[in-house]
Image: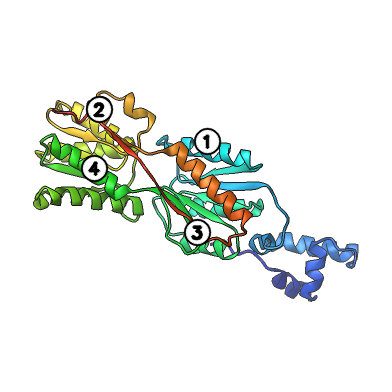
């Protein structure tokens, strides 16, 4: 990780007091123009960056909230952002949006970028790679509010807006069981993600409720794209598996699975029923139309923004808010056998 020079580092290099460097960087008239120039040149040379989090503790308002999302490919996050933007606009805030391309390293860079731009708070859904818990914890400790949504870290004093992934996954698999399916495979997201773990738990709960404990088949995916779903389903079918249903981590994986099933000459849902998760726009475009859980994406954005404004207004005095929103399984042709 790149190391940034501190005021003490610059002072040591120049042989002056840290207070002199601090005043020079602030443009104080107490320091000569020659010294100010010398300090600024050395700061640039040594890759100095101000401690934004410390500065935020006493700074005036910027009126900007940072938003970090893991990707834009699935279509899930743009609708959430619309809700965030509309609600924050009502409260007089602007937003600065970044996306991480599912990279933890890029997510950390985005976090630093937002802090450099003096945002008053950060609304974030984390990448599938994870690993930035400590970075966000440092932000929270610096009194900058953080609100997680959808994909979250369980950190002290961090608020979150989620759905009950375990129960919703359970309902999805029970629907397949009620259609007569018994050999149900789950194409799971990366299991370092909390949402993926909860959906696996719901899948297993449903099979156990129907005494099909021996039927667990969970395939953990490296990625969560349409191509990932296609490749995984192609491999399953090529291996001679006699599955009669697939429950997918998200709609992208489900749409990829549908194409692989069609390419194998099998019928949906007669031979293999398919259920997705998230209710993206693809669910009613793909043929057959996809059964999937409709997460309240727009409302998720609104609620995350409301919590952020409340956290700023109360200066974090209130306990963090953990909000679980309702969602609905929309049953369509991809799984309806009865």
Q: Position of residue 8 (x, y in %)?
A: 71, 73
Residue 24 or 258: which is nearer the viewer? 258
Q: Is residue 259 visible?
A: yes
What is the C-alpha distance between the residues marked 2 and 4? 15 Å
Q: Measuring from the top left, give residue 303's x and y in whole percent.
A: 49, 44
Q: Which residue is mark 2?
A: 332
In the rendered image, residue 257, in percent from the top left (x then y), is placed at: 24, 34
Location of mark 1 (residue): 82
Where disc 3 sits, the SS reads: loop
Q: Residue 228 location, x and y as percent?
A: 30, 40
Residue located at (38% from left, 29% from top): 281
Q: Are marks 3 and 2 in contact (CB under 8 Å)?
A: no
Query: CB atoms at circles 2 and 4 under 8 Å apart?
Result: no
* Label 1 – label 4 distance at C-alpha: 28 Å
Disc 3 marks which residue? Answer: 320
Q: Earlier in the sequence, mark 3 or mark 2?
A: 3
Q: Is residue 50 left or right of residue 114?
A: right
Q: Which mark is residue 171?
A: 4
Give the answer, above or below, for where 34 lies relative to 159: below
Q: Nearer the viewer, residue 288 or 337?
A: 337
């Amino acid at each position: 990780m790149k190391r940034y020079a501190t005021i003490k580092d610059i002072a040591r290099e120049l042989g002056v007091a840290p207070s002199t460097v601090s005043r020079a960087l602030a443009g104080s008239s107490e320091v000569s123009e020659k010294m100010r120039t010398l300090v600024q040149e050395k700061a640039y040379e040594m890759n100095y960056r101000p401690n934004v989090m410390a500065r935020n503790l006493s700074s005036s308002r910027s009126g900007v909230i940072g938003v970090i999302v893991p990707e834009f490919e699935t279509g899930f996050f743009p609708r959430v952002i619309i809700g965030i933007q509309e609600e924050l606009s009502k409260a007089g805030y602007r937003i600065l949006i970044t996306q991480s391309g599912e990279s933890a390293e890029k997510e950390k860079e985005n976090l630093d970028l937002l802090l450099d731009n003096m945002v008053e708070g950060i609304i974030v859904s984390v990448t599938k790679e994870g690993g930035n818990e400590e970075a966000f914890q440092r932000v929270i400790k610096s009194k900058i509010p953080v609100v997680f949504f959808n994909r979250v870290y369980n950190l002290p004093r961090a608020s979150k807006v989620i759905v009950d992934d375990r129960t919703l996954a359970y309902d999805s698999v029970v629907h397949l069981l009620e259609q007569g399916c018994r050999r149900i495979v789950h194409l799971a997201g990366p299991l370092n993600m909390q949402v993926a773990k909860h959906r696996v738990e719901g899948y297993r709960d449903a099979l156990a409720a129907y005494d099909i404990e021996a039927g667990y088949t969970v395939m953990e995916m490296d990625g969560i794209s349409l191509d990932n779903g296609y490749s995984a389903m192609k491999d399953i079918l090529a291996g001679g598996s006699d599955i009669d249903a697939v429950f997918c981590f998200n709609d992208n994986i489900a749409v990829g699975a549908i194409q692989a099933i069609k390419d194998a000459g099998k019928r949906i849902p007669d031979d293999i029923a398919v259920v997705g998760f998230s209710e993206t726009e693809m669910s009613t475009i793909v043929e057959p139309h996809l059964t999937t859980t409709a997460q309240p994406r727009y409302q998720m954005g609104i609620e995350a923004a409301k919590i952020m404004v409340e956290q700023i207004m109360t200066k974090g005095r209130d306990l963090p808010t953990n909000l679980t929103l309702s969602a609905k399984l929309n049953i369509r042709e991809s799984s309806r056998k009865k």
